[in-house]
Amino acid sequence: MLQRLGRRAAALALAQLFGPARAQPTPAPWPAGLGDPFTLGVASGMPRPDSVVIWTRLAPRPLEPGGGLPPRAFQVRWEVAEDERFVRIVRHGEFLARPERAHAVHVEVDGLSSGRGYHYRFRAGDALSPVGRTRTAPAEDAPVRRLRLALASCQHYEQGWYAAHREIAGRELDLVLFVGDYIYESTSARQRVREHEGPVPHTLEAYRARHATYKLDADLRAAHAAHPWVLTWDDHEVENDYAAESSPSGLDAAAFLRRRAAAYQAYFEHLPLAPARAPHGPQMRIHESYRWGRLAELWTLDARQHRSVQACGGGRAGGRVLSACAELADPTRTVLGGEQERWLAQGLAGSDRPWKLLAQASQFSASGVGAPPLDQRIYSDGWDGYPRARERLLDAIAAASGNTLVLGGDVHRHVAAQLRLRPGDERSPVVATEFVCSSITSRGLAEPLVAAMRASNPDLLHARSDERGYALVELTPQAALCDFRAAPHPVQPGAALHSQARFVVESGRPGVARD
């Protein structure tokens, strides 16, 4: 990507966060009188059969620069145990929390047993963190009876409370799958029920403060402490509707890459990602693959960092409503980028798991309004704006064996859809199923518009945008079940969620039906 920029632009972007090599710092004693260093809680993620990543960040005053800590390195002790009382400690060690990484702690704990639960905690000086629970993935050859996950996205802090996370924290789950818009850089005065800590972030310290605001929510901290998380991102982690190095707000390439570098670093600093996934300036790998025994394989996809600029915008990034746009037919346009497309196609072709899960940020099925092609209106930032890229992925899905589920978020509505080789053509075979979760809090489209969407797209079995929530997905060797959990908008602090709709996919029979 940086090859497409001038040398000076690339150098400016990379230089923001990476200076000359530094000597190993000497850890400082924990300062007295600073208060609780674990205000942002604990988290775990990236579960493998023999390892998991555990996370915290030292931040006694998290909305202040540096989290309220002096710019020195501090030693943090970590422990992983088989029991909640930490009588049977199986792994322990120390981590040097550095100021240039916001005193964040990322430990990839290996040597663990597969398919079992653990407890973990951290210590800084005399301060002890909350206890987190996590679990490893089953052994790759294990016959697994069930995978149960919560699919979630889009948690605009200002537009509601995190009642969905409170329910997720209390569920029996194997993992939380979060598919984008973990923070929002933007604000919306008309929809505001609580406030961000400051204006739209552009700098590293501002993005750190925005992440800290979200982590200070007790329900979100509880969901992180209860389960391992697997994550990918969408656009609001940086800027709404950005595409690769192009900024919808008109920043030049060098300025936008500086902003993206700051946003990516703050994202890494606040989430349970492996140390090897730390960003290099404005570049960071987020796409991964995971196996859950012999039952399932999961790919998390990056639909922002490598995508083509949205069509028919004169070369400027940003989504817009389109009809009759000739650029849409360009076969070189991509959402994932060529390298990631090939990686995914090879992974699908080589996987022998009966369930294949593609976790990406948006709605994959068609959602335009009106009669295609000339009278249909589509939104250019979604997969409708990249029809040839969608065709290539559908071809790769059709060529693979087993059952494929495409899981998404972003659009703030619960969606269940058939995925056909030729979208919208009822003569075309169904090759996969799509489940899209509504937002945790972010407002949705007006229901008359969603009704027009359903009328225009017969493959949409379900689409509702008036309620917030998440999707509870359960896989067994026989079937995949999806329960769309929902609450009214805006979500109130004590809101109780209900089942909006339930769907089932039977193994070996492509397509989805109401349960």
Image (cartoon, rainbow, N blue to C red):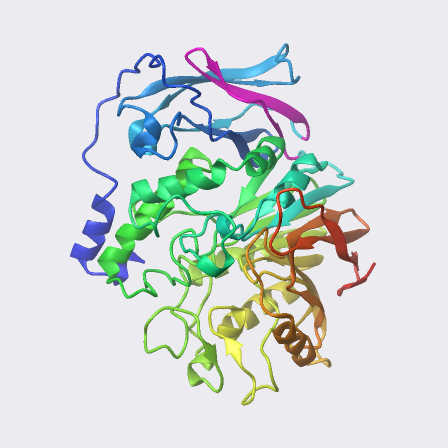
- Residue for point 45% across, 47% down: 195
Residue 464 lies, in percent from the top left, at 68, 65
> Would you say residue 465 sits in the magenta stretch?
no
Residue 457 lies, in percent from the top left, at 67, 77
Q: Between residues 402 and 285, which one lies in front from this camera angle?
A: 285
Quadrant that contains the N terminus: bottom left
Residue 158 lies, in percent from the top left, at 49, 50
Q: Between residues 63 and 45, which one lies in front from this camera angle?
A: 63
User: Predominant secondary structure in magenta?
Assistant: strand
Q: Is residue 458 visible?
A: yes
Quarter-of-image position of residue 268? top left
Q: Between residues 442 and 473, which one lies in front from this camera angle?
A: 442
Q: Between residues 269 and 163, which one lies in front from this camera angle?
A: 163
Residue 486 lies, in percent from the top left, at 69, 53
Tell me where the magenta segment starts and ends, as one range: 115-137
Residue 433's place in the image compared with 175, above or below, is below
- Residue for point 65% across, 36% down: 169
> Would you say residue 126 sits in the magenta stretch?
yes
Quadrant that contains the C terminus: bottom right
Quarter-of-image position of residue 267? top left
380 to the left or right of 429: left
Residue 37's place in the image compared with 414, above or below, is above
Residue 282's place in the image compared with 123, above or below, is below
Residue 353's place in the image compared with 44, above or below, is below
415 to the left or right of 36: right
414 to the left or right of 477: left
- Residue for point 33% across, 44% down: 206
